[in-house]
Amino acid sequence: MGSRPDGDTNGSGQHWPRVNISTVSLTTRLRTWVLVAALTGLLVSIGVVIGGGFLYIFVGIAVLMNVVGYWFSDRIALSASRAQPLSQDEAPELHRIVAELASRAGLPMPRLYLIPSEQPNAFATGRNPKHAVVAVTQGLVTQLPVEQVRGVLAHELAHVRNRDILVASVAAMIAGAISAIANILQFSFLFGGGDDEDSGPLAWIGILAAIIIGPIAAALLQLGVSRQREYLADATAAQLLGEGRPLAEALESLERGTQALPIPVNPATASLYIANPLPRAGLATLFATHPPMAERIRRLRAYDGSLAVAPTG
């Protein structure tokens, strides 16, 4: 049996296939928590720029988003996707696959939910492995071969194992709050907000900055959170499966399926899914939270290539 590779062999300059997953996982978790802290700071900064009592309001919102995100992010994500519990009697094969992969990963069995959508997709959420949830769409289990479904489930369990499901959920909530606040401020600015005699020019400049810059900055920060976690989950899943091929083929199927049948999920929660569920057109492509699918597939193929040439011993 080939030994596990620990460096790149495809000459691309990328070191993903032979990376030390534990080291990268720690680095990525630290980086993503820093980015979530930056999102929280951005939310507070909007209150500072606007001035007045908004500072205290936005500090309160930031604290509330983090607390709610910790305790209820899984319920919010499941409710937003209209997911329903999926019992073992309803999907024995799916439960068997998840139980096998969870055992390999040293994880407790997560709860399974079914999303009533024909688009093939999936996501994981929860505050820790003991409270993890894996949600799959109807389209995933009916359209993809079992081996590809297994690859997708390995990817979602990799998120659980890497403990990035909480940080992604909290980031989604804060980003959503910033976008909602920007919409409220825009409505106030357009319809009567300018009559407030306590509002000076700097306050209105702050409001305009919050309306224009806030959502863009939140999207960019969330992009940084999501892309790193997806690459890491792909790598962890490949090691869990022993090869990258099933997940690579699943990603190819998901790319075709999500483009053919996009679903209008909240953009703030789109980053939770294994594949971008949103329409791919116009400015949306500039702020896609997922890394390019072609690059993810290339790295998985490179992982298998490095295994093939690894010395035996």
Image (tube, rainbow, N blue to C red):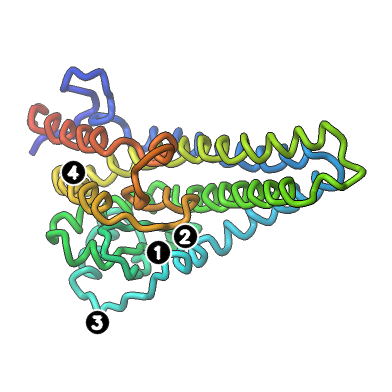
For badge 4, the amino acid type reads: Ala
Residue 34 visible at all: no
Q: Which residue is mark 1?
A: 133
Query: Which circle's residue, 1 or 2, is located before the other in the chain?
Result: 2
For badge 2, the amino acid type reads: Gly
Q: Which residue is mark 2?
A: 126
Q: Do the numbered discs 3 and 2 sit on residues whose CB atoms are within 8 Å?
A: no
C-alpha gap between disc 1 and disc 3: 18 Å
Which label lies toward us, 4 or 1? 4
Residue found 68% across the figure and 34% down from its top: 209
Q: Which residue is mark 4?
A: 248
Q: Which residue is mark 3?
A: 89
In percent of width and height, residue 83 lies at 39, 70
Q: Residues within 10 Å of mark 2 (few under 14, many from 20)?
A: many
* Image quadrant in which the N terminus is located: top left
Residue 276: image tag: none
Query: Which circle's residue, 4 or 3, is located before the other in the chain?
Result: 3
C-alpha gap between disc 1 and disc 2: 6 Å
For badge 3, the amino acid type reads: Asp
Element type at mark 4: helix
Residue found 75% across the figure and 35% down from its top: 206
C-alpha gap between disc 4 and disc 1: 23 Å
